[in-house]
Image (tube, rainbow, N blue to C red):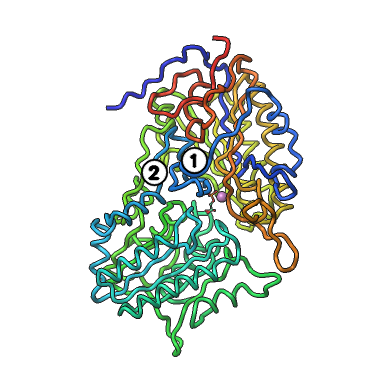
């Protein structure tokens, strides 16, 4: 069995007070320091001062292969980012594992595929998921790989239930993804497989809720996908989206498109989910698939009224989304195995931890942090606190729950009960995703003020702190051409960027309890998020395990 013993660090003494690990979600250090960089435009005296401290500020990689994604063209995201931060290792992530399973054909030999193929001759195969190539939750080319794979292996009737994006990809792009999908479905049709889009809606309105923030989203999805019920029906998906987005000068975002159902000439839904059908959730990322998985998987379920629960479904996820709950039981590709996460070292060495965020990021700083494990690693050593998020579009209240998180964190810091206090502020990310520049500037200013308070609290008890982020977002709020020039729409207004960025993220260390001689090393220029865990253990006065990416700190006096 694995040895979790932590040895005292050779040159860095243990702190008197606690260590705070603070994640400013979506707060990148972007090379474009212009009017569209909300991190740059915001008035942030706290982080500005931190940036000026020699040898205690650097940037670290937060995207692409540094966090286990297929290529360096992939922006980072909170799942892979928090996995890397918490585990100290880089593992192949869902996006990459699905690519490999499709390239090698392994997907089509697995048990999950065998299960859905039982429905190929006589029943319908349904695919539900996010239709874009954002690569955060799903990728359209992987969906197409599955669709072609099913048709080639005998599926006779396929229905796709699409969730429009506009969050990991530019708003308005859903129409193009639908056109591309329709072309594939038509081709399958010409080859003898009846394949159609059956229902859909915006990802922030339908099906893709996370962390039980708003189950009504999942109910709307169930109603549309399974029952064929929605407030709007159309005979084709493009018309559905164009109509529901509304006026071109003030459209509803792809993220918030109302649920819709596609009907035939007689007004009958073309693809309700019936007894014996197969259902594939084609997203690989877990957080926004857990709730809908429960609705499909659990015979006994009372979170909302399903009205009709199809019998004998062959239900699979692209991956297993929760390894502890074994949810879903059947899946197409085994998920990444993330072992020996830093939290396990902490609990096994009696190091008490407090972790906090608001609902929207709560699972990030617990479930993803712990290598996709739900619940406590050890309830005796840990305390997790979730502050309920507002159920609104976050540009309308860009302070979100940052003040409440700060108050509760300060209490934990001053309590003397914890050696590690882990905090995630959602604002730069969640407000950044709305594309609203002014609100995102405000989000950055709010978290800057909160960091100031937290540092003061840590200093008051001779503690140490590190402040970083999981990926960029607020640091670029405009779409750009290849040379970085902001793109303007036909109306002359800048085209908003709602997605994450490829930017590295800041990494700051300090604290009244940190000896002046403990500084950032100069010899790990390529460090990324996975180097944070070893650094954290060093700042707690322990040597890091050999399996972790190297630390970024040293005691220069030793
Ligand atoms: C989301 O799910 O909100 C976005 O697709 C990604 O954002 P996150 O990775 O920051 O959660
Ligand atoms: Co995000």
Left or right? Give the position of 456 relative to 140: right
Which residue is more in the foreground, 429 or 94? 94
Q: Position of residue 277 (x, y in %)?
A: 30, 71
Looking at the figure, which quarter contains the C terminus? top right
Label 1 to label 2, Cα distance in Å? Answer: 14 Å
Q: Judging from the image, what secondary structure is the residue with disc 2 in?
A: loop
Q: Which mark is residue 327?
A: none
How far from the left and from the top, in percent, is residue 366?
47, 40
For ligand 1, tell me if the residue under mark 2 lies within 8 Å. no
Give the residue at x 34% y 79%: 194
Q: Is residue 544 left or right of residue 356?
A: left
Which is nearer the eye, 465 or 293?
465
In the displayed orientation, state which residue is furthest to the bottom.
Answer: 266
Tell me: residue 449, above or below residue 428: above
Q: Earlier in the sequence, mark 1 or mark 2?
A: 1
CB atoms of marks 1 and 2 within 8 Å: no
Residue 418, position as x, y percentages in the image: 53, 26
Q: Which residue is labeled 1 in the image?
A: 82
Q: Residue at x 29, y 73 (%)?
A: 275
Nearer the observer: mark 1 or 2; the answer is 2
User: Is residue 397 placed above or below 311 in the rendered structure?
Assistant: above
| Residue where numbered disc 2 is placed | 92
Q: Quadrant of residue 497?
A: bottom right
- Quadrant that contains the N terminus: top left
Of helix, strand and loop, which one carries label 1? Answer: helix
The residue lying at 41 percent from left, 43 percent from top is: 372
The relative height of residue 283 versus residue 148 in the rendered view (above or below) is above
What is the crowding at mark 1: few (fewer than 14 residues within 10 Å), some, or many (at least 20)? many
Which of the 4 image quarters holds residue 270?
A: bottom left
């Amino acid at each position: 069995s694995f040895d979790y013993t932590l040895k005292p660090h050779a040159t860095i003494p243990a702190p008197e007070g606690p260590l705070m690990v603070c994640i400013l979600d979506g707060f990148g250090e972007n090379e474009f320091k212009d009017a569209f960089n909300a991190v740059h435009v915001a008035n942030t005296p706290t982080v500005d001062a931190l940036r000026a401290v020699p040898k205690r500020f650097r940037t670290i990689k937060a995207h692409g292969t540094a966090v286990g994604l297929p290529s360096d063209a992939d922006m980072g995201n909170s799942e892979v980012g928090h996995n890397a931060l918490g585990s100290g290792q880089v593992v192949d992530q869902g996006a990459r594992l699905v690519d490999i399973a499709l390239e090698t054909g392994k997907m089509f030999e697995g048990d999950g595929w065998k299960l859905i193929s039982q429905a190929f001759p006589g029943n319908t195969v349904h695919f539900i998921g996010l239709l874009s190539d954002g690569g955060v939750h799903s990728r359209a080319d992987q969906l197409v790989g599955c669709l072609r794979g099913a048709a080639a292996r005998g599926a006779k009737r396929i229905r796709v239930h699409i969730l429009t994006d506009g969050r990991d990809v530019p708003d308005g792009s859903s129409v193009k993804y639908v056109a591309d999908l329709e072309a594939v479905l038509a081709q399958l049709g010409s080859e003898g497989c009846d394949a159609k889009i059956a229902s859909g809606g915006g990802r922030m309105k339908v099906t893709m809720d996370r962390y039980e923030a708003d189950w009504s989203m999942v109910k709307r999805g169930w109603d549309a996908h399974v029952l064929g019920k929605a407030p709007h029906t159309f005979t084709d998906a493009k018309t559905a989206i164009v109509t529901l987005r509304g006026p071109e000068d003030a459209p509803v975002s792809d993220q918030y498109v109302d649920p819709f159902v596609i009907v035939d000439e007689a007004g009958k839904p073309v693809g309700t989910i019936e007894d014996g059908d197969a259902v594939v959730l084609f997203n690989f990322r877990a957080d926004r698939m857990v709730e809908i998985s429960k609705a499909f998987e659990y015979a006994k379920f009372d979170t909302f009224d399903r009205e009709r629960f199809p019998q004998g479904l062959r239900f699979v996820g692209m991956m297993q989304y929760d390894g502890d709950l074994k949810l879903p039981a059947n899946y197409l590709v085994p998920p990444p195995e993330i072992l020996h996460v830093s939290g396990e070292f902490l609990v096994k060495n009696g190091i008490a931890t407090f972790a906090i965020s608001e609902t929207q990021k709560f699972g990030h700083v617990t479930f993803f942090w712990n290598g996709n494990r739900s619940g406590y690693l050890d309830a005796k050593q840990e305390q997790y606190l979730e502050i309920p998020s507002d159920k609104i579009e976050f540009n309308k209240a860009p302070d979100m729950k940052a003040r409440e998180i700060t108050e509760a964190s300060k209490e934990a810091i001053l309590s003397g009960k914890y050696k590690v206090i882990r905090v995630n502020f959602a604002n730069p990310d969640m407000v950044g995703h709305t594309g609203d520049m002014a609100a995102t500037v405000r989000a950055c200013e709010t978290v800057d003020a909160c960091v100031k308070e937290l540092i003061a609290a840590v200093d008051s008890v001779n503690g140490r702190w590190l402040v970083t982020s999981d990926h960029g977002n607020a640091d670029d709020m405009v779409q750009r051409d290849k040379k970085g020039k902001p793109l303007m729409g036909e109306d002359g207004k800048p085209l908003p960027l709602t997605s994450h960025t490829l930017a590295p993220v800041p990494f700051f260390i300090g604290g009244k309890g940190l000896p002046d001689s403990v500084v950032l090393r100069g010899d790990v220029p390529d460090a990324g998020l996975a180097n944070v865990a070893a650094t954290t253990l060093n700042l707690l006065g322990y040597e890091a395990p050999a399996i972790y990416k190297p630390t970024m700190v040293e005691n220069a006096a030793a």
